[in-house]
Amino acid sequence: MFPVFLAFSLLPKISLAFGAKTIYVSAVNVTQSLSLAVSPTCGSLNSTNFTELNTGVNLKATKTVVAFGDSWTANGSNGTIPFPPVLYPPNPSAGSYSGRGRASNGYVWVEDLGNSIGAKVIDYAVGGAVVDLQAYNSTKNGPVFTSDNQLRVDFVEQTSLFLQQGRFLADLNPDTTLYTVQFGINDHGQYAIAGGDWNKTTETFLQQLSILQAHGAKNFLIHWVYFLDTLTDAFQTRIHDGICKAHQVNGTNFATVNLQNLFGAINTSGSKFGYTNTTCLALSNSTDFGCKHPESSVFYIRELQHNLIDFQLNVNEAGHPSAVVHKF
């Protein structure tokens, strides 16, 4: 057991149109002919492995959502006001004319969550982010940049920026503020490049939760990654152990979502959801040669060049979800 588990568990509860270009607006409010063919499976605090659970997070009471993570959560705002999810081809990122916006063709999941419950969203997630840059040999000698030439950041930096400005941006009443955390995809990728230290990744993840709790956080929503892998599974199980101990000691509320269930079901039979295509765009940085109906695609932006048969998804080949997948 890491020392950080004990430190985290013992923290007390604290009250507290450009030119002549055509603009394509994402169909964010259009009803799509897709269905949710899998439901969450609630697990137990006593589970020895990571699972889906909710120890008391009340979405109906949530007025503010503070988000941390990577491109699956990022809306390009980095704690500021985001641009509307408008597409400016050939840039594939909704909400960006020339730089980094959303890695999708519409709202990302945390924005959909905020819209559905009427909560303000403050999004600190950044594409390419990992839990701790110092945990991986490929990133610890920084600064380092992502494939789209953007500075790579981590959970530590995102937390620090939030603590500097967050209290000025929204009402952070502990009872009505939800903190969402979504990491692991890029951690898996950076470790695969040159190795690293998953123990440090785990410690840092729990330390950041501790820091946020010390500043009033009482409600967390944590996403487990969408793929099966020995390393990320072990990492998530240790995080699960840490947050369960925290809840038992000080009553911090945690809800966890296992994306493996959703994408596993899509992988088995995408047609049950209404999908007819795996990835919409042929290129990772352009809408050229893309599909005509992204709402029928599982992924929108391609991460790597690959050929897939049916819906056989591969962690090293998949990209970024389409807007309709984010709604799930």
Image (cartoon, grey):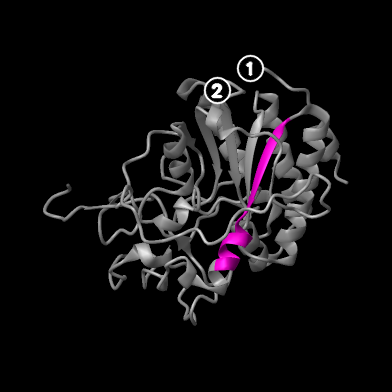
Q: Earlier in the sequence, mark 1 or mark 2?
A: 1
Instruction: Answer left or right for 35 relative to 22.
Output: right
Pick out the residue farthest to the left: 20
Tell me the residue at 76%/47% (across/down): 240
Packing grade of label 2 (10 A; few <14, some 14-19, many >=20) is: many
Magenta stretch: give its range. 252-265
In the rendered image, which residue does mark 2 sit on? 172
Asked if labels 2 and 1 touch by Cβ distance under 8 angstroms, the answer is yes
Q: Amino acid at mark 2?
A: Leu
Nearer to the camera, 25 or 94: 25
Q: Quadrant of residue 293?
A: bottom left
Residue 14, by quadrant, is top right
Instruction: Give how far across and how far down residue 16 sits, in percent.
Output: 63, 17
Name the residue at 67% across, 66% down.
228
Q: Which residue is mark 1?
A: 16
Q: Position of residue 162 (x, y in %)?
A: 55, 31
